[in-house]
């Protein structure tokens, strides 16, 4: 049930982002200084900001920035993180030792602090955020895949594949990886949420997406000076973050339950 509810919620958010230009009659960048700080109404369901821009329009267009960012920064590092971890766990020896030392160095620094340092060095901007996350976010997936592979490599189907003369590449990618990747898929849902929160947090601090781009964190930052007289400017983009995070967490819980039932059935 949680998987269905989360999937429906997330699908609705995705569709709202895709069809945003047709759902709202306003432009997210066009200013209307005669209608600044208007409260929610039938004309502007989410009100207007300090530049007279429709907040609902900007929230919907923000989906087009935050969701692709969360998707790419989650699943691009997941791909090479899982591959590296699975290969290291299967091969062991020197390659495994080198990978673990690299992981130890990266994990030694707090993730958020490391991202902020890299972005501060490279400069604010969405490309530099992508780059900083691609350099650091793969470590957890590598650890998960390696741990799973250490268990899988001694199972009967792996031993049978070795006896049949299959090479390490075929054993890892064709036989072991479908079982190794399950935990990474479940973890990716929470990581998806964290990455969306990350870009919003960096934008709030002025290190991420910069105004007037309609990004949720940047919108929250723009509205903090008007929080008492125009609460909707910051509150409603923040609510969009909460709803998106809740949908992804429900999907993650549902996947964990389904995969757990599947593994239990196989055992």
Image (tube, rainbow, N blue to C red):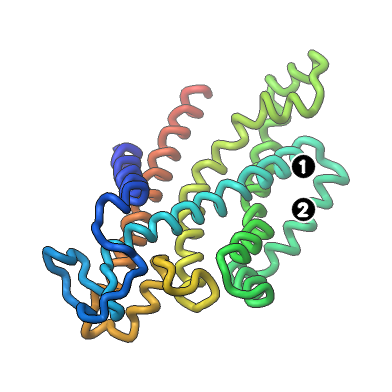
In contact (CB < 8 Å): disc 1 and disc 2: yes
Judge left or right: residue 229 versus residue 224. left
Which residue is rendered at x = 68% and y = 25% of the image? 174
Which residue matches tag 1? 88
Mark 1: secondary structure: helix
Comes first in the chain, label 1 or label 2: 1
Q: Quadrant of residue 233?
A: bottom left
Distance from disc 1 to disc 2, alpha carbons, whole Å, reads: 9 Å
Which residue is rendered at x = 40% and y = 49% of the image? 248
Whether residue 92 is visible: yes
Given the current orientation, which residue lies at the most extreme top position?
164
Which residue matches tag 2? 100
Whether residue 37 is visible: no
Q: x, y percentage for residue 84?
A: 73, 44
Which residue is rendered at x = 80% and y = 16% of the image? 163
Q: x, y percentage for residue 83?
A: 70, 40
Q: Is residue 192 above or below residue 26?
A: above
Q: Is residue 47 above or below residue 135?
A: below
The quarter in which the N terminus is drawn is: top left
Mark 2: secondary structure: helix
Which residue is rendered at x = 48% and y = 52% of the image? 68
Q: x, y percentage for residue 22?
A: 28, 50
**Between 219 and 170, the one nearer to me in the picture:** 219
Q: Is residue 227 above or below residue 69?
A: below
């Amino acid at each position: 049930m949680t998987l269905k509810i989360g999937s429906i919620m997330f699908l609705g958010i995705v569709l709202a982002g895709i069809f945003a230009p047709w759902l709202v009659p306003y432009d997210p960048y066009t200013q209307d200084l005669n209608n600044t700080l208007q409260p929610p109404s039938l004309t502007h369901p989410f009100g207007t900001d300090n530049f007279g821009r429709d907040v609902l329009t900007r929230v919907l267009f923000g989906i087009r920035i935050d969701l692709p960012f969360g998707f790419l920064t989650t699943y691009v590092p997941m791909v090479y993180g899982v591959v590296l971890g699975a290969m290291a766990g299967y091969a062991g020896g020197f390659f495994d030792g080198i990978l673990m030392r690299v992981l130890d160095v990266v994990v030694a620094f707090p993730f958020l602090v490391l991202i902020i340092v890299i972005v501060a060095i490279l400069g604010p901007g969405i490309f530099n955020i992508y780059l900083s996350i691609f350099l650091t976010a793969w470590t957890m997936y590598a650890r998960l895949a390696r741990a799973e592979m250490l268990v899988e490599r001694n199972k009967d189907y792996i031993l049978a594949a070795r006896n049949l003369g299959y090479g390490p590449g075929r054993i890892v990618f064709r036989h072991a990886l479908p079982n190794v990747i399950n935990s990474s898929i479940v973890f990716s849902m929470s990581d998806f949420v964290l990455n969306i929160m990350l870009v919003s947090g960096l934008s709030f601090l002025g290190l991420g997406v910069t105004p007037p781009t309609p990004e949720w964190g940047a919108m929250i930052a723009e509205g903090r000076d008007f929080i008492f007289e125009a609460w909707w400017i910051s509150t409603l983009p923040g609510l969009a973050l909460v709803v998106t995070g809740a949908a992804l967490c429900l999907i993650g819980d549902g996947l964990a339950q389904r995969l757990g039932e599947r593994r239990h059935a196989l055992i």
